[in-house]
Amino acid sequence: MIVDESQAVNIRILTAAAVLFAACQSTAPPPAASSDTLIVFYDVQTGDAPLLAAVQRERAKILYRYRQFNGLVLSLPSGSDAEQAAARLRQTRGILSVEPDRAMTLHAP
């Protein structure tokens, strides 16, 4: 079998991803999800300016930036309705998705 350079790179990337995934397995319980935390992804061509303006309007706090994935993790102010805030954020130009933070289990412990 002949493998060109781009195929070899893809094989290396997939192998590294598999190793990292296997190394990420934990016996610790997942952290509890927060009902006032949203994960928002935006279109890189639109940029984050419309989203940042919406974050200010919602009086939310940026907890984390996913720079490689063009996303933010937002903490809503206490007493905010997360569903309504998510609906408003989805109306913002360039927003691709708005999802509540939640614990996800990839496999049974």
Image (cartoon, rainbow, N blue to C red):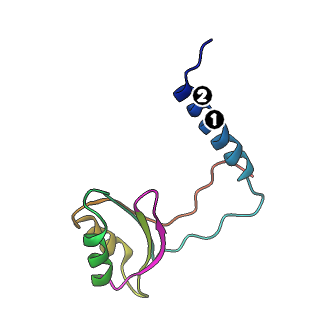
Measuring from the top left, give residue 66's x and y in whole percent.
Answer: 47, 63
Q: Is residue 44 magenta?
A: no
Q: Is residue 74 visible?
A: yes
Of all residues, the one furthest to the top in this rendering is 1
Q: Amino acid at mark 2?
A: Ala
Q: Nearer the viewer, residue 47 or 58?
A: 47
What residue is shown at x 75% (from left), y 57% (from top)? 26
Q: Which residues are magenta?
A: 58-70
Q: Which residue is mark 1?
A: 12
- Vertical placement of 52 versus 17: above or below? below
Asked whether, in this view, residue 22 is left or right of residue 7, the answer is right
Q: Nearer the viewer, residue 32 or 56?
A: 56
What residue is shown at x 60% (from left), y 28% (from top)? 8
Quadrant of the image for the N terminus? Answer: top right
Q: Which quarter of the picture shows residue 62?
A: bottom left
- Vertical placement of 47 versus 84: above or below? above
Q: Amino acid at mark 1?
A: Arg
Mark linked to residue 54: none
Asked whether the beta carbons under mark 2 and mark 1 sit within 8 Å of each other, the answer is yes
Q: How many marks?
A: 2
Mark linked to residue 8: 2
What residue is shown at x 36% (from left), y 79% (from top)? 81
Measuring from the top left, give residue 14's x and y in whole percent.
Answer: 61, 36
Asked whether, in this view, residue 15 is left or right of residue 46, the answer is right
